Amino acid sequence: MPNTELAQRVGLSPSPCLRRVRALEEGGVIIGYHAAVSPSAMGRGLRVLLHVDMADQRRDTVEAFEAAVLEIDEIVGCRRMMGNPDYLLDVAVSDLEAYEQLYMAALTALPGVANTKSQFIMKVVKQTPGFGGAG
């Protein structure tokens, strides 16, 4: 949204509004900007949550796993969890066949993986745009 529109909505003039936005950016409150895209329009309408349990928690294993995850485009989110599972991966693919191919070729070969469990998302009931950023 343009700064002038934001300023009007929050009841400030444009200059002070822009200074406050810049301060929020510099302070790490605003960590980025993005466009919301339709997964289906991108050919990735099937979303899968993959629970990953690691064989061990050694630093080199964890670092190798995380580095490998960053190289797989279909993994659109990865969270290291406290407790079980060790990781929760958000995978976006076109269909079940594409997921099976990815699973067999790449996901099962991730370093240090002991076992996995796939959950297929039926419906997103709530997702707050822009919340969560880097996590």
Image: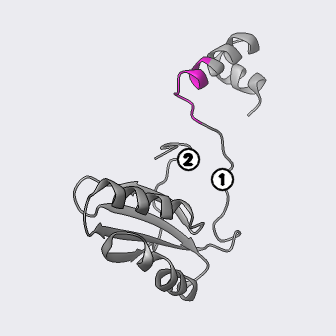
Of the numbered discs 1 and 2, the one sitting upstream in the chain is 1
Determine whether, in the image, residue 15 is placed left or right of residue 135: right
Q: Who's the residue at 22% across and 57% down the image?
A: 83
Mark carried by residue 129: 2
Image quadrant where one finds the N terminus: top right
Mark carried by residue 36: 1
Q: Nearer the viewer, residue 1 or 19?
A: 19
Residue 14 screen position, x and y as percent: 75, 15
- Judged from the image, the secondary structure of the residue bearing numbered disc 2 is loop
Per the model, the C-alpha gap separating discs 1 and 2 is 8 Å
- Judged from the image, the secondary structure of the residue bearing numbered disc 1 is loop
Determine whether, in the image, residue 121 is placed left or right of residue 102: left
Give the residue furthest to the bottom.
Answer: 97
When the figure is inspected, residue 111 is found, relative to residue 95, above or below; the finding is above
Image quadrant assignment for residue 120: bottom left
Residue 27 screen position, x and y as percent: 53, 21
